[in-house]
Image (cartoon, rainbow, N blue to C red):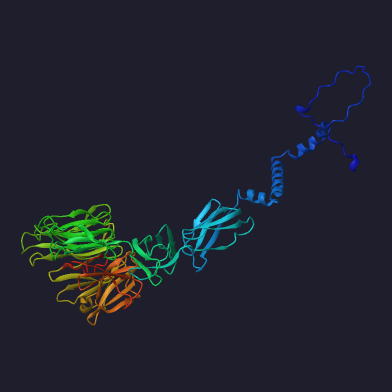
Amino acid sequence: MAEDEIKEEPEVTTEEEVVEDPAPETEEPEQEKPKKSKKSSVKKLTPHLKKLVSSKKRKIIIIIAAVLVVLGALTAIPVTRYAIAGLVLKKDVSITVLDAKTKRPVSDAVVSLGSVNAKSDSKGIAHLKSVRVGEYSLKITKQYYSDSTTAYTVPVFSAPATTTTDLTATGRQVSILVTNKISGDPIEDVTIVSSGTSATTGSDGTSVIILPTKQDTQTAVISKSGYNSLSVVINVNDVTAKNNYQLAPSGSIYYLSKITGTINVMKSDLDGANAKVAVQGTGKESDTQTVLLSARDWQYSMLLAKRDSDQDKLYLINSSDDSLTTVDQGDATFSLVGWSGHTFVYIVYRNTTNYWDNKREALKSYNADTKKLTTIYETSGAGTAYYDYQYELLSNVYILDNEIVYLKSWEMGSNSIDTTKNASLISVDPTMSVKKTIKDFPNTYNASVSAKLYSPQSLYIRTQNYPSDAVFYDYEDSNIKVVTNVTDDTFDNAYPTYLISPNGNKTFWTDPRDGKNTLLIGDKNAGSSTQIATLSDYSAYGWYGDNYILLTKNGSELYIASADKPLSSTNQPLFITNYHKPQVSYPGYGYGYGGQ
């Protein structure tokens, strides 16, 4: 169809546009015809506009187009561009602050861009987060430095410029070195505060702090999370003085001391500082039988002592407040096994019970967190006298990574042999709720069974039925099997006590060689070992955290050292304290400290 043949659509009139019909014409004097109004032009456009906005989608497109036109016009003007973009665009900015003279990083300087500010770190870098794009005055201030103000722009379309600004010192530049008191290693991010200013050490443990020169010395406080704070005096005007300081890692250890004539439980920092009495002795404590065993994280300690009577009692010491809680008591003898996590395991021998009575012996546990005392097993008995007795014995209790294992066996008179009563190797899970028999062993009058820990997680078991030869078993990873390469000599060997680190990934032990001690650290199974000392007078005592080892010398001196480097003439253990060591020891017990 030709273009001139297109018929015009009839005009649609809305209610608002309805006009009343004009009145009938009357004869009037002839007048000038009115000019065509603008309204009629708009009316002609109205159908096209309505068609354009007739759908929601078209309306949105029109609005977006209008906004883009306006924004395009506004962003053509720089001031307007930053004002508008700043409403939605924010960027992270990093500013490096250096000393104008030494070119060393200036830490703890306050860097500001508008309302956003941050302090420079040990590398002199201040990280300002979410700064609106725009033009700013970059302001940097620090005590005993001249203020700095420069122009800085956070751009819309590109990354903020990496800027380095020099500050000019107005005081004395004093160098400080901070190292770990135990390991000797430099400590990063240590804060030094003095005379209203501060500085932070870098990865080499050093920092430069600017101090006023009106006095030759200034007091300062040196601190870092995980370390004990230290108050020091800094030499300011003596350029030959070395301001080198040592921080001790935070933490406390517990030990027995009889320095006052009474056996007290003492508590001190890791470097021996701030020693104090945690539990005051009563004077009734036995010199030889008072025992203190601490959990691997040192949160709890178990004390075996006579304190208010002639009978031993078990007490729990909580390191959070040094509180003392009675765990168990009675006319009994307590044989301590040790800590499995925060659960303490021990055997009770009831003194007033006959050998052939039930419940003469009991294997118990105490959960230090929940304060729950659990009887794991109680022995049985039969008979009326020594000629017809039958009674169970508990022995060879060992704490392993995920279980506690023990032997129970029977003693019987020659006239009361009961072959239905077997000896057994039994396992208990760490919750003390699930027990299982690993293996039963036949019982005869001439039979015996015993076990020995030969590596951190492995046992040898020897069964003997005289006059037959002994049979040996190996128990490891919850599996037991007969082994033929083990002899009586192998079984009777004096195996090291492998001390397990808190995270369970490392072991620390002593191996006597040539009349002295070799100290070794290995993995969780004592493999991949590294010698940290040879021909040494030190012995392994325990761990503090996973980075420090505790050592003992001469049976009464306690030391601490880094677990990450061998001992040498320039790396000697740090002396903590002298302590009181009872005659009781716990060979094979590696899951707590103080029993070696």
Question: Which image quadrant is residue 310 in?
Answer: bottom left
- Point out residue 132 in the picture as x, y percentages from the top left corner: 58, 52
Task: Tell me if 554 is positioned left or right of 544 in this view.
Answer: left
Q: Between 380 and 145, which is closer to the camera in this rendering?
A: 145
Q: Nearer the viewer, residue 293 or 589?
A: 293
- Asked whether residue 231 appears in the rendered view, the answer is yes
Can residue 437 be seen in the rendering of this structure? no
Q: Nearer the viewer, residue 248 or 411?
A: 248
Residue 176 screen position, x and y as percent: 40, 67
Q: Quadrant of the N terminus?
A: top right
Q: Residue furthest top?
A: 26
Residue 525's x, y, as percent? 32, 71
Residue 367, above or below 580: above
- Residue 535 position in % (x across, y down): 26, 80
Image point (51%, 62%), residue name = 125
Q: Is 59 in front, or is 129? A: 129
Q: Is residue 27 left or right of residue 190?
A: right
Q: Residue at x 21, y 54 (%)?
A: 324
Compared with 26, 483 (above or below) is below
Q: Most extreme residue toward the right, as rendered?
A: 30
Q: Identify the image quadrant of the C terminus.
A: bottom left
Q: Residue 563 lies in what quarter of the image?
A: bottom left
